[in-house]
Amino acid sequence: MPEKQKVGCARPTGGVVGQAKERSGVDAAEQPKEGKKMIQVGKPAPDFVAPAYHKGEFTSVKLSEYLGKWVVLCFYPGDFTFV
Amino acid sequence: MSVDSVFVHKMWNDHELSKMVKGGVPFQMLSDGGGKVGTAFGVYDEDAGVENRGRFLIDPDGIIQGFEVLTPPVGRNVAETLRQIQAFQLVRKSKGTEATPSGWKPGKLTLKPGPGLVGKVWEVWKTDMARD
C-alpha cells in the first residue's frame, strides 16, 4: 500500500515500472527508441510508481499494489482548472 | 493524476476541493511530472504538456477492462463510470456466464450467452432498453 514520503525541496517524479530512467544530453540521442505499446482493453495496465498527496500526507503509489481491487485511474489536464 | 506536483495537489485540495467535498479528496492525488505515466497510457499531450481526460477501469487482476479519453474542455459522466464498474463486477462474479446488454443498469435483465441465445436476443431484449 502507499508508503509515506519525506518532504524535501526536490520535485519527486514517478514512472513506469521496468522502464529505464531517461538519460540527459548526448546519451539520450543514442538510446534506441522503444516501440510504443498501445493501450488495449483486455490487456494488462502498465505498472507505474507515482508520488501522491492523500489526506495531509505525501505518499508513493504503485499500481501493482492494488492487485485484488478494482481501480479507477483518472488523468486530467491540471489542478485549479475549470472543468 | 496530472502533471502537477504533489505540492500543488495539496494546495488545490486544501484551498478549493475541500470546499466542494467535506474532508477533501478521499483518494490518492497522483503526480506525473513529465507525463511518463500518461505517455504509457496514451493520454499525454506532448504539445500542450498536459494529460487529456483519460479514465481507465482496471480489474483485480490488473487488466484494463475499459477506458474513455476526452480532450480537456469536456468533463466526464461519473454515473456512467459507476454503471460500467457495476456491469464489469457482475460479469466477473458470474465468471462470464452473464453479459450486460446495451443500456443495462443494476436490476435490469442480463443475457446468458450460449447456443440457445443465438438468434433469440430479439425475444428478450428490446431496442428501447438501450436508452432508458
Image: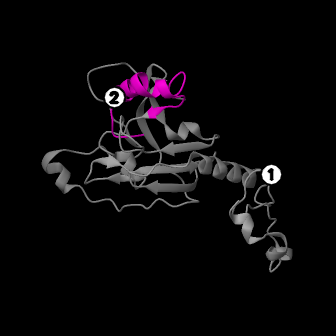
Q: Quadrant of the N terminus of chain B?
A: top left
Element class at badge 1 = loop
The x and y percentages for residue B74 are 43, 52
Query: Would residue B59 be counted in the magenta stretch?
Result: no
Whether B61 is drawn above or below B28: the answer is below
Tell me the SS state at disc 2.
Answer: helix
Question: Which percent across, then down, holds residue B16?
Answer: 41, 26
Residue drawn at (61%, 51%) of the image: B80
Number of callouts in the render? 2
Q: Is residue B61 left or right of residue B100?
A: left
User: Neighbour class for label 1 at 10 Å: few (<14), some, many (≥20)?
Assistant: few
Which colour style is shown? Answer: one colour
Pair 1/2: label in front = 1
For this rendering, which residue is in front, B34 or B126? B126
Output the chain of dot 2. Answer: B
**Picture coordinates of residue B27 (x, y %)?**
53, 31
- Residue depicted at 39% across the width and 55% down the height: B71
Separation of residues labelled 1 and 2 (CA atoms): 42 Å
Q: Which residue is mark 1?
A: B107
The amino acid sitting under disc 1 is Gly
Residue at image location 55% in from the left, 58% down from the top: A43
Q: Which residues are magenta?
A: B1-29
Q: In the rendering, which numbered label is found on residue A20?
A: none
Rendered view: A65 above or below B109? above
Task: Please identify the residue farthest to the bottom as the structure is shown.
Answer: B119
Residue linked to disc 2: B8
- Label 2 CA crowd tier, 10 Å (few <14, some 14–19, many 20+): some
